[in-house]
Amino acid sequence: MRKLNALLTMFFSLVFVSTARAQVNNAQLKGDYAFSFNGMTTGGGSASTPFAAVGRFTADGAGNLTNGELDSNGVGVSLAGVEKAVALAFTGSYSIGADHRGVINLNIPGGGILAFAMMANGNAKFVEVDASGGHGTVGSGSIEKVDTTTFNTARITGDYAFGAAGLDQSNNRTAIAGRFTANGAGVLSNGAADENMSGRFTTLNLFSGTYMVTDTSTGRGVMNLPPLVGGALQSLDFVFYVVNGGKLFAMESDAVSPLTPLLSGTVLQQQTPVGGFSSSALNGNTVMYLTGRTICPGGANAAPNVIAGLLSTNGIGVANLTYDQNCGGGSSSVTGLSGTYNISGNGRSVFQLGGAYVAAYLVRANEAFFIVPDSSVLFGFGEAQTAGAVTNSAVAGSYAGLATTAAALGVTIFSGEFTADGASPTGNLSGTEDIGAPSGPSLGVAANATYSISSTPTNGRGSITGTIGGSGVIYVVSASKFVVVSLSDSNPAVLIFEQ
């Protein structure tokens, strides 16, 4: 999605691959979509700067994209030779093969080539694959169907939770999680948030703001959060694209600086119980997955710090956490970390787990944005785990996989299609990956792994070994979704697989 000095040989090879994927499944991508992309750009060597984009397009089911529009932000030269694009119109083409993997070619200044994997619900996971020779942009994102009837300010109304994370021009990490109430007329009130700016953690008890859908034909809008009292961040201006009345893809649109880092994330409508949230909103198991960036023990440079775990709560304030962590290749596992939690009526939750503090903002029961006041700025999401014992049989069928939120340039960023057999005691996961890397893409790479999942002592936790993340752990959310964290990779990421 940036202007690149790509080699012609690479360009033609990508075009060939795109054409070679017989257009037998193009109808799988049909209708109106919004997308969100998070990545980084390098001009050679190991240095990188952040880059993000949000936008929308219409797919005709026959390989053509129309009505495209995107906003991007980053540091240095990008689209059309400028630092960011604002409501840039585009068209494009795409092709989807028999294995549900596809390639999108965007007609934008400098070009843009995306490899994507279709999901059963018509959405897709994608990576950018047009970098080469150590130059270009790499990253991953999501494409989701939209409800065009919600493209107006009045349809964004009610209580919302939000989360966003990113980097400044020096790759210092910031994250923010919070909530607000939208009145349907452009005013945000009853705001609360927690922010972590390179380890400086602040809780914001009350703020207000504004928002507006500025283009009812594309679903593009803007949102302003004024200087948050007590926080380090300046006034934040976001551009967003509507997915539906309950979901927005958002990106910080200010020029990237230490006080306005490039944040990107999601706004989700809260399912607020009558009378507000209480401790009973956390009652069961939540699979949580977080990403950070820091100089890990024994390391010299900043590296990804990733966590996946199972948070168990009893509905009356008692919590238990089992998690696995990989910081720059140094892994650890913690079992049965006990503690307590408290939930405010607006959905803000506070955990004390073995002396550690974690904040969260509930979207609904057992689902929330999580943020940690640590130096790596851990931030992520948690989803309710399906009820009952979870074993190998829960991971069976076809999945689209994605390496999410890469926190360092060395992360293997892929999308792909995978099949799991659900066999017990050891299951088999195999598939095909498309990998974007600064040195150039690797398309159609065969990948496989074996997995073993148990319901005890930690429900739905298991081991996974192979070429999909190396040696790591797997946490099952449900029969349609699981997450993987490598414990052997020195540049790990949270890998998400969804049917």
Image (tube, helix red, strand yellow):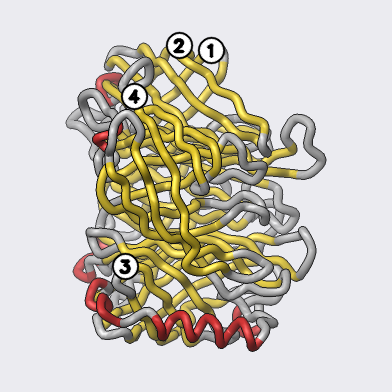
Depth-wise, is mark 3 or mark 2 nearer the camera?
3
Q: Earlier in the sequence, mark 3 or mark 4?
A: 3
Q: Are marks 4 and 2 in contact (CB under 8 Å)?
A: no
Report, in whole angstroms, how far the alpha carbon at label 4 lies from the one at label 2: 21 Å
Which secondary structure, mark 4? strand
Tag 2 or tag 3, which sits nearer the N-term? 3
> Residue 80, image x and y in percent?
62, 84
Tell me the residue at 28%/53% (across/down).
398
Callout 2: SS: strand
Name the kind of residue labelled 4 in the image: Ser
Counting other residues with Cα less than 10 Å from the Cα at mark 4, is it few (<14), some (14-19), or many (20 or more)? some
Which residue, given by chain and number where applicable, does mark 4 sit on?
454
Residue tagged 3? 100
Which amino acid is tagged 2?
Answer: Ser
Alpha-carbon span between mark 4 and mark 1: 25 Å
**Cα distance, mark 3 to mark 2?**
43 Å
What residue is shown at x 71% (from left), y 52% (from top)?
171
Q: Disc 4 vs disc 2: which is toward the camera?
A: 4
Question: What is the three-letter code of the residue carrying label 1?
Answer: Gly
- Name the residue type under label 3: His
> Which label is found at residue 338?
2
Left or right of 463, for residue 491: right
Q: Report the front residue among 158 and 88.
A: 88
User: Tags 3 and 2 in contact by the CB under 8 Å rule?
Assistant: no
On screen, 55 above or below 165? below
The vertical placement of 279 against 237, above or below, is above
C-alpha distance separating marks 3 and 1: 45 Å
45 vs 29, left or right, is right
Q: Residues at badges 1 and 2 in contact (C-beta under 8 Å)?
A: yes
